[in-house]
Image (cartoon, helix red, strand yellow):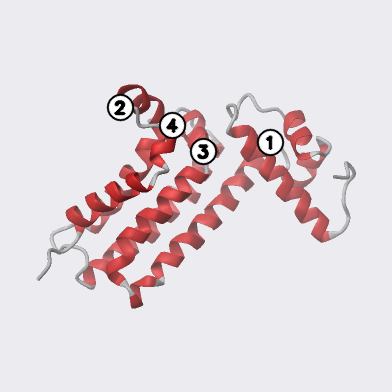
Amino acid sequence: MSRGRPQDPEKQAQMMSALLDAAERLLDQKSYQSITIRELAAEAGTQSAMISYYFGNKEGLFIALLDRSGRQRQQRIQEVVFLLETQPESVLPVLVDRIADMMSEEPWLVHLIKDEVLTREAKLRAHFVKTFPARMGESLLSLFTTLQQKGILREDINPKFATASLISLMAFPMIAEPLIQDVLGVDRQVLRSSAWKQHLTLLLTQGLGSPPR
């Protein structure tokens, strides 16, 4: 990869993507605070100045990473929303499958939550709330409300509580992985397995779903 400043828009997009990918890889290995601009540039095969040029600073780079991740999550949730008209009964199982994949495919995000979101009042935390729980919460709340209207979700379930329960069930095991691994032997590999997805699907469909008529 060239270490100069690309002028072609396509090459610029490739450079930005390379820097974002480098941020993902490094964040999966170490904390946000310990990652340096020099390391980010070296990982992406470019010069440190490119981070300032494209993102302003290290924080700007990671904010852009959260934005990219947020767009990808919304697209995958939207795929589930499309099932409402044709296969509403399959929404909950597919939703669990999609969110479980998203959580397991982004270990860097889990690390960022542990290191920055839960422990610091910083710009990254505010941006995370805007791009992850707030945006996804709105989508899931709308989804659960529609499922209730279609008779898939129990009438006595509060859609807001259902949304909070789903987020908790999906996110907490990933965040608390070191604890549950030591105590129960449930590690990242288990949390990525089909058996874990089936377990979560059973909890949600049995707990939230309308009983057969």
**In the image, 5: left or right of 36?**
right
Q: Residue at 22% x, 57% y: name it.
A: 205
Dot 4, how many residues are within 10 Å of its Cα: few (below 14), some (14-19), or many (20+)?
Answer: few
Secondary structure of the residue carrying numbered label 1: helix
Report, in whole angstroms, how far the alpha carbon at label 2 lies from the one at label 4. 23 Å
Earlier sequence position, callout 2 versus callout 4: 4
Which amino acid type is marked by label 4?
Leu
Above or below — where is 39 with respect to 123?
above
Q: Nearer the viewer, mark 1 or mark 2?
A: 2
Judge from the rendering whether residue 107 lies leftward or rightward of residue 157; answer left or right: right
Q: Are marks 4 and 1 in contact (CB under 8 Å)?
A: no
Disc marking residue 118: 4
In the picture, the disc for residue 184 is 2
Separation (CA) of disc 1 from disc 2: 37 Å
Depth check: 63 or 151 in front? 151
Q: Which residue is mark 3?
A: 107
- Asked whether the viewer can see residue 167, the reply is no
- Three-letter code, disc 2: Leu
Determine the residue positioned at 32% across, 59% down. 93
Q: Residues within 10 Å of mark 1 (few under 14, many from 20)?
A: some
| Contact between labelled residues 3 and 4, with CB atoms less than 8 Å apart | no
Measured Cα–Cα span from mark 3 to mark 1: 19 Å
Count numbered badges in the picture: 4
Cα separation, mark 4 vs mark 1, equals 20 Å
Residue toward you, 148 or 28: 28
Residue with the mark numbered 1: 58
Q: Nearer the viewer, mark 4 or mark 3?
A: 3
Give the structural element (helix, strand or loop) at label 4.
Answer: loop
Q: Nearer the viewer, mark 2 or mark 4?
A: 2
| Viewer-closest of 52 and 195 | 195
